[in-house]
Amino acid sequence: LVRQIAGFGPTHLVLLDHSEFLLYQIDREVAALAPGLSRRALLGDVRDRRRLDRIFAEERPELVFHAAALKHVPLAETNPLEAMRTNIEGSRQVAEACLAAGVAQMLLISTDKAVAPSSVMGAGKRAAELICQALDRASDAAGRGCRFVAVRFGNVLGSTGSVVPLFQQQLAAGGPLTVTDREMTRYFMTTREAVELVLQAAALARRQPRPGSVLMLDMGEPVRIVDLARQMIRLAGKRPEIDIKIVFTGRRPGEKLHESLHRPEEAATPAGVPGLLAVDAGAPDWEVLGGVLDRLAAASQMGDLDAASAVLGELVPDYRPETDNPPKGSTP
């Protein structure tokens, strides 16, 4: 996102991250890519509302892209309270800071894992979508002019933590390539395609007539992970199962065999831009949602996982934790 936005020549660009090293990396990259661009690299955490408010008051951003999240499904399963605090409370903090600072638009990067979620990560992302939907409707009703939009899509090839860099590392080491399940499928899109559509979604949302919609990228057909592994082996000039082995390790906590981009009851209609769909996803009023979020925040800050999980289930009723994963190494 930063690379493509910098290429469009914005008046000013603010980079906000809680990782010192990654912030340093992207700041240096922007400096080389657009040396004349006005920018600031700021350390901060989406959980820290005071820090967010100070930054927003100083910078007065017009457009905010909220991509910060804990997104590794198994790690989120073993650190559920941390995932809730970042993915849910952090999203609320950013959204409310946008309202307080008079931001014109906030765009949330969401995921297909938010659809009928089986993981804490997916349920947290659905909760973040609800925050955007409810605030978008409330802001529109109050005539405040701040738009909130969530953009939902599947896997991005080569993104941090994705399967492609893992396969590349395993190929470089001579294999084997590890696949969780023979039948597992995922939606894939290149980074450039995904970012271009996200930026178009941001432009579209300015004139989106239906407050509270979720935008969705048209990801095409899902791909079997094992087929992707075999293709990467062939592209490396090797023969699958002969030169490079593929090992099936079994599904990990929170993982589903197949993802969906929208629920059956959610009508997905063309959004007016090729590759973008608008999804009518239900959401409660902000007054109601805010009360539930307060209870979730209190439980997570107290370290009460049982209470926090119960509130998360109330917040996202179709959240079904994946507890029936096959034993390691087995296949359906």
Image (spheres, rainbow, N blue to C red):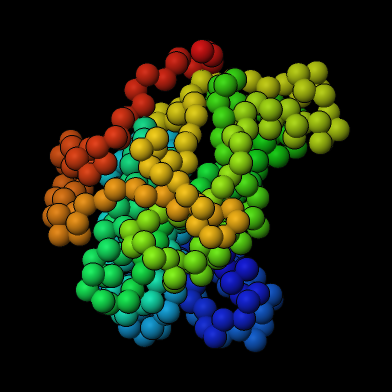
Q: Answer with left or right where residue 89 lies relative to residue 197.
A: left
Where's residue 164, x and y in %?
65, 41
| In this picture, residue 198 sits left or right of residue 278 | right
The residue shown at (73%, 27%) is 230
Q: How many marks?
A: 0
- Seen as rendered, the residue at the extreme right is 237
* Residue 9 pos. (x, y %): 62, 81
Q: Could you say where residue 12 lies in the image, as x and y percent from the top left?
A: 52, 83
Quarter of the view holding residue 140: bottom left
Where does residue 231 sit, x and y in percent of width and height? 75, 32
Q: Is residue 45 above or below residue 307?
A: below
Image quarter of the N terminus? bottom right
Residue at 68% across, 32% down: 228
Q: Residue 284 or 161: which is nearer the viewer? A: 284
**Quarter of the view holding residue 95:** bottom left
* Residue drawn at x 20%, y 59% as measured from the top left: 286
For the residue pair 284 and 174, the one nearer the viewer reads as 284
Whether residue 195 is visible to the viewer of this picture, yes or no, is no
